[in-house]
Every structure is written in C-alpha cells, then in structure tokens.
Image (spheres, rainbow, N blue to C red):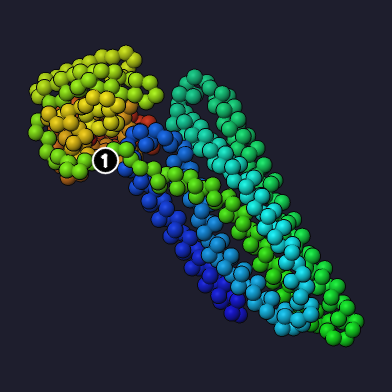
C-alpha cells in the first residue's frame, strides 16, 4: 500500500517537474532566438531551431523525469531489498556480493556503448534537422511544386533524407540493445548463485523453501531496479546529444550590442554610408559611399540584386565589416537598438504576414493605432483600395503562409506596419 501511494505521488510530482522544466527550456530558447541578430540566425536553419524546441526538449524532459522518478526510486529499492535479503538469510545474501566483480565489467561496457553512440546521436539529430527543413520547404512551396510538376522530385528528396535518418537511428538502436545483455549477464548470474546456495541450504535444513521463495521476490525487485537503471542509461545517452544542441542555442550570444552610453534620440533622417564594406565569406559590398539627405527620394540599382538588400543597413540588422553607416550624423552602432529601429522603417523584398486579420498585421507598427489611422496610412501606400474590396475588408483573415494575398498585396500591407 505504501509503494502504491508513494508511487502515485512520485509519478505526479515527477511529471509536473519535468513538464515545468521543458516549459522553462522552451521559454528561454524562444526568447533567446528573439534577441539574435541576422548573423546569429544564419548559423541555425529554421528546421534546426524547430527540432531543438520540440524533439530535443522532449528527449531532455523524458530523461529528467526518468532520473527524478525511476533512478532515485530504483536505488532505494535496491538498498532495502538487499537489507531484507541479508535479514532472511545472510549466507545466501552473500551471493549478491559474489556478483560485484561483474559490475566493473558492466560499467566499462556501458561506458564504451555511450562513447560509440553519442556521435551517432549527434548525426541523427542533424539529419532530423534536414528532414524538417525539407518538409517545411515543401509545404511552404507546395503551389510551386505542383505548378512545375515536381512532386516526384520532392518525394525522392524526402525519401533520401528520411532513409538516411532511418539508417542512422537503426544503427544507434542496434548498438544500444547491447546494454540489456550486459545487464542480464549480471542479473542471471546472481539468480544462479542464489539458486545454488539456496538448494544446498534447504537440503542441509538451515533454510526453508518459503524463505527461498521470499528471497526470489526480493531478487526480482533488485533485478527490476537494475533493469530500470539500464532504461535510464539509454534515455540519458539519447538526451545527451539533445542537451548539447539545446546548450548551443542557449549559449549563442548576439553579436549586436548596445554601446555603453547609447544615444536615445535621432536628430534627423539623413543617411550616409562612408566607405562601407560588408562580407559573409566574400564581399557583397566594397568601399560604398552614399548620402541621402532629409526630404530626398533616391533610388538605386545594383547587380546582383542581393547587394540592394545590404544597402538597407541603416536599421543595423547586420554590422558592417568596414566603414560606417550614419543616421542623423551618428553612427548606427552608437544608438540604442530599439531607438534606431523604431525610427528607421524598411520594407523587404520578401515580406511575411502573420496569421490573423489584416488589421492585426497593420498594428504591428503601432498597437494603439485607430481604424482611421490605419486607413489613412493604407491610402498613402495604395493598399486601401484592394483591402476594401476583400469580403471582410480590414478584418479579412490572413491564412497560414499568407496564401490568400499576392506578393504585391503583401508588400502593400507590410508597408504601413513597418512605417
């Protein structure tokens, strides 16, 4: 009865603790990503971040629950079962101690298994990232796939990465199953020794059959405890790779920081590039000088078009490699980031509208904007006409992936929100 009560309590509190631990991990990881600069985000694919927030956290959560619930309980059961075994008959109980030389062999074997499978688990989760990326790209570009009749190509691509995942994970599982025979070597040796000693003592009259039967009950508790320890070992080995991937995300530091004494005021809207160079691995911009004065409208063209994107560095999404970008006569690196980005608006070539109504997307720029202000700004960017023609007007719901609006309409809807 006590085992039932405490088992139920252990399950309840262990589940609550592990679920709370997973929630805190996801919370910290998600908020960490929000602080990343573009260069930090470039290090992690979208599929990789999703895998870390879901599968990796789940693996760590299960391992945490196994440790707090099973590993602790198993050790307690092991100690008390041994105590009861010695209490019934000390001579037979020494059979347990006769198995102790096997335990170092068992520990060495499990250590070798962990060393073998840990790198494989790391590869497995990287393959999982690739598979998630393939699925995400296929779903987001499903209309393009069907328009160009590329279903077979996409199916073959998914089959390849899925087959690789199956191959790697099968290899891990085939290696990890060796842990159970190692455990059973120790366990069944113990049973054989107890049976041999017990039979001799029963024949000699110093032990009854009932005592031997009760001894086997305690032996089974000990065996179950050791088997559950093996299960925890397998779970910990799997979650180790996941924990390392989570740690990579949590320890990644943004390379964009506010200066010691940041500027909180942008005096004017002049923008100037002074001998600006920017590179990833190769230079996309080199020695660029550009001046845009307040009140002027300027347009620029560059080939390839990718360089146009890097000219939009005034909001400090990236830091320049060389030179400096100034807004209002002050280097953008001297401003407080929130101050700078609230004063500099940018409409990207590829815009994203989030699930919700058009009105909710427009209020990204100003949560307190009234309906009249939204309509006024939309008229300025020539978005009011097509929005008004929609069935629900500004309350029209944007579908997932903004598939119910065109690319031009997305830009028009994004412009008021950004500006």
Q: Residue at 49% of width from left, 47% of height from top?
A: 244
The quarter of the image holding the C terminus is: top left
User: Could you tell me which secondary element the residue under label 1 belongs to?
Assistant: loop
The quarter of the image holding the N terminus is: bottom right
Res. 365 in view = no
In the image, residue 96 sits, relative to residue 397, either above or below, namely below
Q: Position of residue 335 (x, y in %)?
A: 18, 37
In the image, residue 281 sits, relative to residue 240, either above or below, namely above
Identify the image quadrant of residue 230: bottom right
Please give left or right for residue 221 compared with residue 273 in the image.
Answer: right
Q: Residue at 45% of width from left, 48% of height from top?
A: 247
Q: Nearer the viewer, residue 127 or 351?
A: 127
Count of numbered labels shown in the rendering: 1
> Callout 1: 10 Å neighbours few (<14), some, many (20+)?
few
Q: Nearer the viewer, residue 40 or 61?
A: 40
Q: Residue at 32% of width from left, 43% of height from top?
A: 35
Q: Residue at 23% of width from left, 32% of height from top?
A: 315
Residue lying at the far right in this picture: please name it: 203
Q: Nearer the viewer, residue 369 or 16?
A: 16
Res. 225 in view = yes
Q: Position of residue 364 (x, y in %)?
A: 24, 40
Q: Position of residue 403 (x, y in %)?
A: 37, 31
In the image, residue 37 sits, relative to residue 311, either above or below, namely below
Q: Position of residue 280 (x, y in %)?
A: 37, 26
Q: Which residue is mark 1?
A: 257
Please give left or right for residue 170 compared with residue 197 in the image.
Answer: left
Q: Nearer the viewer, residue 231 or 252?
A: 252
Please give left or right for residue 149 compared with residue 104 in the image.
Answer: left
């Amino acid at each position: 009865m006590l085992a039932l009560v405490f088992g139920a309590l252990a399950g309840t509190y262990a589940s609550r603790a592990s679920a709370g631990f997973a929630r805190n991990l996801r919370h910290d990881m998600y908020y960490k990503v929000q602080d990343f600069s573009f260069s930090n985000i470039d290090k992690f694919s979208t599929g990789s971040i999703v895998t870390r927030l879901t599968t990796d956290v789940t693996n760590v959560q299960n391992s945490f629950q196994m440790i707090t619930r099973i590993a602790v309980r198993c050790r307690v059961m092991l100690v008390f079962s041994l105590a009861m075994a010695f209490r019934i008959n000390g001579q037979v109980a020494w059979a347990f101690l006769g198995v102790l030389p096997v335990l170092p062999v068992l520990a060495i074997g499990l250590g070798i298994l962990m060393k073998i499978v840990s790198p494989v688990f790391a590869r497995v989760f990287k393959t999982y990232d690739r598979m998630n990326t393939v699925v995400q790209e296929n779903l987001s570009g499903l209309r393009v796939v069907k328009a160009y009749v590329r279903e077979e190509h996409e199916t073959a691509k998914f089959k390849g990465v899925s087959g690789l995942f199956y191959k790697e994970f099968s290899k891990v599982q085939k290696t990890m199953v060796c842990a159970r025979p190692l455990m059973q070597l120790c366990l069944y040796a113990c049973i054989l020794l107890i049976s041999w000693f017990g039979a001799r003592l029963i024949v000699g009259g110093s032990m009854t059959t009932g005592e031997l039967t009760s001894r086997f009950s305690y032996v089974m508790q000990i065996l179950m405890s050791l088997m559950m320890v093996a299960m925890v070992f397998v779970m910990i080995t799997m979650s180790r790779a996941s924990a390392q991937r989570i740690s990579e995300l949590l320890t990644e530091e943004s390379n964009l920081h506010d200066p010691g004494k940041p500027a909180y005021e942008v005096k004017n809207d002049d923008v100037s590039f002074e001998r600006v160079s920017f590179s990833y691995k190769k230079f996309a911009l080199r020695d660029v000088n550009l001046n845009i004065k307040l009140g002027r409208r300027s347009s620029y063209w560059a080939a390839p078009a990718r360089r146009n994107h890097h000219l939009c560095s005034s909001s400090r999404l990236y830091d320049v490699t060389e030179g400096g970008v100034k807004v209002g006569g002050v280097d953008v690196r001297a401003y407080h980031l929130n101050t700078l980005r609230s004063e500099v608006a940018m409409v990207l070539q590829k815009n994203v509208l989030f699930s919700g109504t058009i009105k909710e997307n427009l209020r990204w720029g100003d949560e307190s904007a009234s309906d009249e202000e939204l309509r006024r700004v939309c008229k300025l960017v020539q978005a009011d006409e097509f929005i008004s023609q929609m069935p629900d007007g500004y309350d029209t719901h944007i579908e997932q992936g903004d598939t119910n609006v065109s690319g031009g309409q997305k830009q028009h809807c994004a412009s008021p929100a950004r500006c």
